[in-house]
Amino acid sequence: MYLLHSTLNDYLCDQIQLLFSYFFNLSSVPETWSKGVLSDIADITMGQSPSGNSYNIIGKGCPFYQGSTDFGAIFPAIRMYTNKPSRYALALDTLLSVRAPVGSLNIAFENCCIGRGLASIHGKNDNNIFVRYLIKNNRWYFDNINNSGTTFGSITKDYLFGMPITIPEDKLVAMFEHKSSLIEQQIYANEQQIRELQSLRNWLLPVLMNGQATIID
């Protein structure tokens, strides 16, 4: 069942991309749109790793994501917790990998702590989805780093904050955000069901294998 939800979420993400392409054809920019940088429209937090002795895998504290190694197709998977978080991302913020591979994106499923390999990006005007897809559709800015030949490529705060962007009219952004948020709500609900089913599977399999329970036809 969770494979079905995952496939559906991939499809729904494609629908948001189609909406973005429909609303914002970046190859033909109207004169009413303006030029700016990413920090004009988003609050950006560069990650910082907490003390190593605060890490645990027993759920003590809050989820901790170090970098893109924690990323899934859409949302990261929890591998580690910390009880001494230093830098935060809020649920549904964009998580951006700032170390190789630079530019990979995920969505924060819950409030979490982010390490040095990540930055969290939050739209300043309730436009999280627009900001996320704007970054996604300007991937070239990060590919320049990945293609530089540096094995351990990374981006600085100034490089990220100064990412050049085109800023459409507020009314158009609001229309896109409203329509796409309805789709993202379904993506999030599907992810919740995926995690619940995976948790049930992880609990049930050992019970069945140990003979503590049997399946009756």
Image: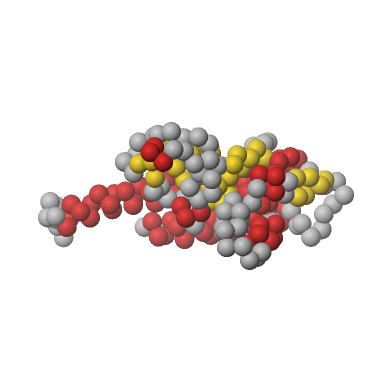
The residue sitting at 65% across, 37% down in the picture is 43
Return the residue nearer the eye: 66 or 174: 66
- 174 lies left or right of 75: right
Which quarter of the figure has residue 38?
Answer: top right
The residue sitting at 84% across, 52% down in the picture is 30
Task: Say if residue 196 shows up in the picture.
Answer: yes
Which quarter of the figure has residue 18?
Answer: bottom right
Q: How is the image coloured?
A: secondary structure
Quadrant containing the C terminus is bottom left
- 215 lies left or right of 46: left
The residue sitting at 23% across, 52% down in the picture is 204
Q: Residue furthest right?
A: 31
Quadrant containing the N terminus is bottom left
Q: Residue furthest left?
A: 211
Q: How far across and how far down the image is residue 210, in percent?
A: 14, 55
The residue sitting at 76% across, 57% down in the picture is 25
Q: How many marks?
A: 0
Task: Say if residue 174 shows up in the picture.
Answer: no
Q: How far across and how far down the image is residue 97, in percent?
A: 57, 52
Q: How far across and how far down the image is residue 173, in percent?
A: 71, 44
Q: How far across and how far down the image is residue 137, in percent?
A: 68, 57
Considering only vertical position in the picture, is 179 above or below 214? Answer: above
Return the residue nearer the eye: 159 or 9: 159
Considering only vertical position in the picture, is 84 above or below 159? Answer: above
